[in-house]
Image (tube, rainbow, N blue to C red):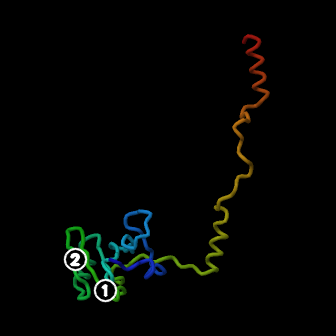
Amino acid sequence: MSCLNLRDLYGDRYKVAIEENLPSKDPWLLVLLCESGHICPWGPNLLAACTSSRGSIAKRLTALPIATVEQNGSDGINVSFHVDHFDKIAAIMKPRRRRRMSEAQRLVAAERLREYQFKPAAQPPHSTLESRVDPQRVSKHQEALSNGF
């Protein structure tokens, strides 16, 4: 069964995350993180809004005729809705928006952060054959050992 790909539909406006922190491109695992929970795929043309607690957001979602309560628990609710009603649900759930910068803002930020960019090493690291001890100290130590000290 196929599902809606949140990255394709809303990735330009909202931050899309992977639910299980797995390196997977499975669209079933994509979620839109919101202030009070998340929005995830529920079916071919359905999405679900999942609240992280009971309260005013859950009450507002259950009062909507466009939302169907799928799970009602002590820690929140899950309601399904048709993808066409996304804007109404998003106004309640408030998904996290992607940062948008103009080209001029990008250039200013790049210049400001240039000092913190990765820089290649100034000198190559010491090889394993080189001694890190001063050669004169080593020769004095060897002389002292040979003299019986």
Amino acid type at circle 1 is His
Q: Does 104 sit left or right of 6 as displayed? A: right
Which residue is depicted at the point 49% across and 80% down?
12
Q: Amino acid at mark 2?
A: Glu
* Residue that mark 1 sits on: 82
In the image, 30 versus 57, the foreground residue is 30
Which structural element holds mark 1?
Answer: strand
Image disc number at residue 111:
none
Of residues 141 and 4, which is closer to you in this image? Answer: 4
The residue tagged 2 is 70
Q: Residue 67: horizontal and vertical position, in percent?
A: 25, 84
Q: Residue at x 39, y 73 (%)?
A: 27
As displayed, is residue 42 above or below residue 65?
Answer: above
Task: Assign a secondary structure to mark 2.
Answer: strand
Which image quarter holds the C terminus?
top right
| Residue 22 % position (x, y) | 41, 62
The x and y percentages for residue 52 are 29, 70
